[in-house]
Image (cartoon, rainbow, N blue to C red):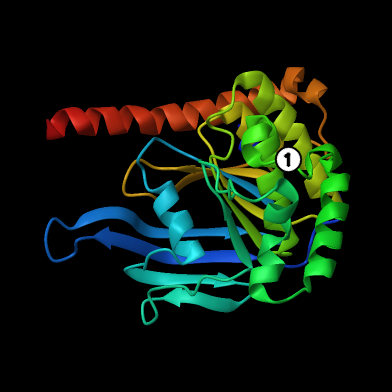
Amino acid sequence: MTRVSEQTAPITPPARSRRGALRIDEVSKIYDPDGAAVSAVDRCSLRVEAGEICMIVGPSGCGKTTLLQAIAGFHPISSGTITLDDEVLCSTDKPLAKPGSDRVVVFQNGALFPWKTNLENVAFGPLVQGTLTKRAALEKARGMMAGAGLTEVEHNYPSEVSSGTRRRVEIVRALMNDPKVLLMDEPYRALDALTRRVMHGALLELYYRQPVTMFFITHDLEEAVYLGHKIIVMTTRPCRPKQTIPVTLEHPRTPEVVTSARFLALLRETRAAVDEEALKAFQDGEKEG
């Protein structure tokens, strides 16, 4: 039987950004190398094309977030190289990437300032970096919030709006910095299923207006298929790519696609690959016990 990932039907997404090509070459990360020597990532190599939504899935604790944080510059790698648009972020000789506005992280838990209005939160990045005047930053923030349907909550504080709206404000704030890459660490994990579906549509609308490379970690396999241009399934720890699954669904995506035969076939293939690794993780845990 032909596997879905082996089929090569062309993808026709909206015009993609030409920035944000991410390369990870033979990257390893060992915690406590002089003691317990826990290998979180082992000789991991993968490519994310410029303007691509790349979904990263795998068992809990396999090392996905460790890899994302290395790209962001939150902790050093042990060996290998990570490059962005052919510029070395970190390497064996330079283990810690320098954080920058070219890579913006959207975390699992909200990171909005509760004492600032939503508008002030969105405008914060360019102001603190000194790239825009206050007037210009607020004007740009208003425009971006209007494009995301957030005009009515400009002057509300984060605590005064729904969790889904807060997530949308965070993503607009991230895009204010005109990043090359959005690093998404399970941004919708805490949302209920209905709100997640609404947020998927909102994210794609933002992407179609401002295409940006996304390195998107999720445990929601339907989310991975619905949003992604491709899915990279990671092995149980230590993390490395097990399988790359091209998502051969046309963009722009609509909710109706989730009932299509192609969507369901991609979902089955993704689930089979992840379940195989989850079983290995469970069996390894039993052995360690």
* Circle 1 residue: 156
The front one of 72 and 168 is 168
Relative image position of residue 15 (x, y in whole percent): 86, 55
How many residues crowd around disc 1 within 10 Å: few (fewer than 14), some, or many (20 or more)?
Answer: some
Relative image position of residue 37 (x, y in whole percent): 18, 58
Q: Is residue 154 left or right of residue 3?
A: right
What residue sits 37% from the left and 30% below the top? Answer: 278
The front one of 47 and 31 is 31
Seen as rendered, the residue at the extreme bottom is: 93
What residue sits 34% from the left and 70% below the top? Answer: 79
Residue 237: name its quadrant.
top left
Image quadrant holding the C terminus, namely top left
Q: Is residue 252 left or right of residue 25?
A: right
Secondary structure beneath label 1: loop
Vertical arrangement, residue 59 with respect to residue 117, above or below: above
Vertical arrangement, residue 101 with respect to residue 277, above or below: below
Tag 1: residue type? Asn
User: Is residue 24 visible from the viewing direction of this image?
Assistant: yes
Residue 197: name its quadrant.
top right
Image quadrant holding the N terminus, namely top right
Relative image position of residue 64 (x, y in whole percent): 43, 48
What residue sits 67% from the left and 53% below the top? Answer: 121
Q: Is residue 231 left or right of residue 256?
A: left
Relative image position of residue 204 (x, y in whole percent): 77, 41
User: Is residue 9 visible from the viewing direction of this image?
Assistant: no
Vertical arrangement, residue 52 with respect to residue 279, above or below: below
What residue sits 40% from the left and 80% below the top? Answer: 94
Q: Is residue 59 left or right of residue 133?
A: left
Q: How many marks?
A: 1
